[in-house]
Image: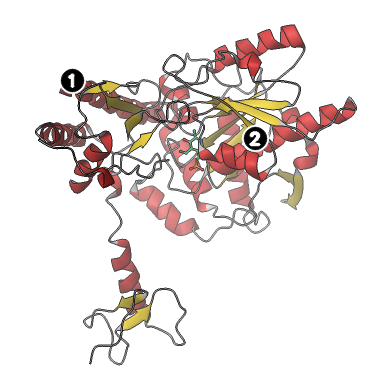
Amino acid sequence: MPQERDKDSLSVNPLFARPGEDTVASKTKLADGEMLPETAYQIVHDETMLDGNARLNLATFVSTWMDDHANKLYAETYDKNMIDKDEYPQTAQIEQNCWKILADLWHSPDPGGTIGTSTVGSSEACMLGGLALKRLWQHSRRADGKPTDKPNLVMSSAVQVCWEKFCNYFDVEARLVPISEDHKCLDGFELEKYVDENTIGVVAIMGVTYTGMYEPVKQIAAKLDEIQASTGLDIAIHVDGASGAMIAPFIQPDLEWDFKIPRVHSISTSGHKYGLVYPGLGWVVWRERQWLPEDLIFYVSYLGGDMPTFALNFSRPGAQVVLQFYLFLRLGRSGYAKVQQACQDVALYLSAGISEIGPFELWNDGSDIPVFAWRLKEGHTDKWSLYDLAERLRTKGWLVPAYPMPSNLENLTVERIVVRNGLSMDLADSLLADIRTETEYLNRLESPMPQEAAQPGFHH
Ligand SMILES: Cc1ncc(COP(=O)(O)O)c(C=O)c1O
């Protein structure tokens, strides 16, 4: 008699179950008894097999490949807890080395004397940047005897969800400047209408999640200079460089976007995106120590010294920090430049190829970060949409998400490719061939695709 099953049951292949073991386990309830490690391993291994092929996932920005030396280091350090600076002083030292390297890369006037930290990702890093802006604004308002109950943060409507979370979690009004066909990202246009005495800062994104475009930090700063000249408001910028802060220094070294601009008080990035480390790592660095208010810092003593820390999480893995240092040593500036340039070459090649297919119009071409988005040309068809193309590509293993643009442009659907390390020219050729074939298929349709296919996928 087969054992009874329900939707939460996990069936154990009789070939995997060891003598005497049940062939049904629960997915959602802890069993009374134990399972042999071999059987448990096989089950979990098989469950994860259903995940997609990370190399064909062109939706995510996050690293999916590291070399064998990194894998070895990972295996040697996955037990390290980043917060345990007494137990792992060397890992703590490596963390400091890393943010000092970043402070230098981003032209802090005092890379050795400023302050930074690792985080679990850009989301936490952005929140720390936002918190510092909020606290500094509160201090200055209190010093002037003014109320502090209505802080706001000004940013593009195309910000990543972490900024909406920050505003929600930390009671800050999110003032979103809508993007439009004429102003495809926050560029300073009409900024004076959004900032006021309650503005804690402006977020500039280096590599907008929706499209990959850089927001012109220098232009935004110049607009804030003008606003200061006419109103006296001195408003700082946090650069959300989740992707771009690890691209621009290497392949657009002449672009001014970082601490060279005095108004940029803090910069965050994801070590696990173009920092090229496995998931679970972000960084935030302040231009100078003064921009991280002292009352947000906690001190831990290790190595006989006093180590300043500022983070939302307590325990978290230290291995990714070690891996970041490995890559900094291994690649240096020239190595990072080669890897990022290879991605950009593929992005430009793909965007040119897609624009030649016919029905598509590029929103951007991947010449900022190696990410670009396109849309269907106006009036091309009402039989299919980019959601259908995304579905068709999915059947070939490619994850190329289609989604609506943010408010104000929400009726516009785009499709996006994130070129990461590992998407070679050869793979790009296969992808282009598949996009051509599937577009031809869709163009031959005699009646419209069913609407249920048109569901926006997850994108981040
Ligand atoms: C511009 C931007 N900021 C923040 C984030 C959040 O990054 P993380 O996933 O590292 O928390 C992302 C993620 O894609 C992003 O693109």
Disc 1 on helix, strand or loop? Answer: helix
Question: Of discs 2 and 1, which sits in the foreground?
Answer: 1
Q: Is residue 420 left or right of residue 323?
A: left
Q: Is residue 345 left or right of residue 245?
A: left
- Provide residue 39's location: percent of width, then percent of height: 32, 78
Task: Check disc 2 and give the amino acid type.
Answer: Gly
Disc 2 on helix, strand or loop? Answer: helix
Say whether residue 113 is visible. Answer: no
Say whether residue 208 is visible. Answer: yes
Quarter of image, res 126: top right
Quarter of image, res 133: top right
Task: Check disc 1 and give the amino acid type.
Answer: Glu
- Provide residue 431's location: percent of width, then percent of height: 19, 36
Q: Is residue 206 above or below residue 394?
A: above
Q: Residue at x 55, y 58 (%)?
A: 80
Q: Residue at x 75, y 26 (%)?
A: 198
Towards the viewer: 353 or 163: 163
Classify 10 Å Cα crowding around label 1: few (below 14), some (14-19), many (20 and above).
few
In the picture of the structure, the residue carrying the numbered disc 2 is 129
Q: Which mark is residue 445?
A: none
Q: Are marks 2 and 1 in contact (CB under 8 Å)?
A: no
Q: Which mark is residue 356?
A: 1
Q: Is residue 375 left or right of residue 199?
A: left
- Provide residue 110's location: percent of width, then percent of height: 67, 24
Classify 10 Å Cα crowding around label 2: few (below 14), some (14-19), many (20 and above).
many
Quarter of image, res 450: top left
Q: Is residue 252 left or right of residue 19?
A: right
Which colour style is shown? secondary structure
